[in-house]
Amino acid sequence: MTAGRTASPSHDHSTGQDQPGWIGEALAEHERLEIDTAGRRQLPLADREQQVLDRIDRARRRKPRVREERITMSHGSGGKATHTLIEAIFLDAFRNPLLEPLEDAAQLQVGGSRIALTTDSYVVSPLFFPGGDIGDLAVNGTVNDLSVAGATPLYLSAGFILEEGFPVADLNRVTESMRAAAAAAGVHVVTGDTKVVQKGKADGCYINTAGIGLIERDGSLGVARAQPGDAILVSGPIGDHGITIMLARGELDIEADICSDTAPLNGLVAGLLDAVPGVRAMRDATRGGVATILNEIAKAAGVGVLVSEDDIPVRAEVRGASELLGIDPMYVACEGRLVAVVPGEDSGPALAALRAHPLGEQAAVIGHVRAEQPGIVQLKTAFGGTRIVDLLVGDPLPRIC
């Protein structure tokens, strides 16, 4: 055999045409643009991926429009349908500079003071669940919306819609729970309302709350303030509340030692802001879970977000139940967890401040903000690849709060 026909592979980095045999053919194949079955020339894989990302970005920038003729359960999920409903119907009708940021609480100037105002309604089913009930959920949820706006929660309202036939003993249990939660958070319920509807019209008890808090610190918080290089933190294990509610309904033959994480976050937030005055944004991860907050950051700030699956704290029981239910914990609601965005250089002090509080002992840095691929959230998987984390589609866990 002559030297020109040797089958030994070459060790240089020449092109596919310079390589002999199957090695040359393989290299040449990688160097050529792929041709599809119709004979059309396609872009290389990396360019095709960018093309998909560009299409996603263009779709997100279109004017939102509700396509359904009637409201569905998915409109309350905190995902794509909820965002579309809010932007196409409510924001379009009530648009003003105070509403447009769509933060958890509006920031208002009253005289010489800055206050935060928020409202929320609670329709959780069942009303009583491991770790809490609709009463403390209503108080904690409102306190948390004020807290992540940088406000000190002060006063709440409470409106009750009661169904005919609802047991008075259960109502006493709910109000006692609210009283204890308010005392723990250092707030007062100062006004309210009560309505009763016919049997079968309210599923027992619904609660609406509003809250007012005082913003005493300089600066403002908001997801639109996120910048490339910022770190993203979560204050503890995610998904506890949503999975607890799902299992408490008794529709599935699954047993797990899981309790709701419902808790007031005002003390945790105060410690974080004391340690890191430059916090960019905070959100409590309720409907739609952490995934929704990450998408809100990416969209509002026009940045990319990259998080690591290995760094996101999830209890083993929650992960196991989620796998059995076919649900991603990233989309499951919490009621005592926050997501914070801080300058990259402040990630250490921020993490230490969170872990110094009992509600933040398992806090973690889960990712960072970047300039690449604005508007897109990507997850670095445990297997080393990446996937896009989009807004929730549908409603796998209805009526969790």
Image: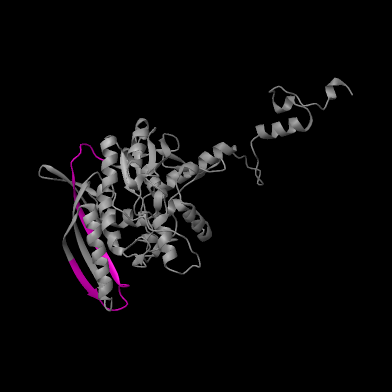
Q: Quadrant of residue 126?
A: bottom left
Residue lying at the far right in this picture: please name it.
1
Q: Position of residue 164 (x, y in %)?
A: 26, 78
State the residue at coordinates (34%, 52%).
336
Q: Tell me how many marks there are.
A: 0
Q: Quadrant of residue 142?
A: bottom left
Task: Report if residue 126 lies within the magenta region.
Answer: no
Q: Is residue 15 left or right of residue 329?
A: right
State the residue at coordinates (25%, 37%).
274
State the residue at coordinates (34%, 54%).
335
Question: What span is colored magenta in the figure?
Answer: 193-220
Q: Nearer the viewer, residue 53 or 251?
A: 251
Looking at the image, is 143 positioned above or below residue 178? Answer: above
State the residue at coordinates (50%, 64%).
254
Residue 4 at least partly seen: yes
Residue 100 at least partly seen: no
Task: Report if residue 194 lies within the magenta region.
Answer: yes
Q: Nearer the viewer, residue 369 or 261?
A: 261
State the quadrant of the C terminus. bottom left
Q: Position of residue 137 (x, y in %)?
A: 30, 59
Looking at the image, is 63 positioned above or below residue 250? Answer: above
State the quadrant of the N terminus. top right
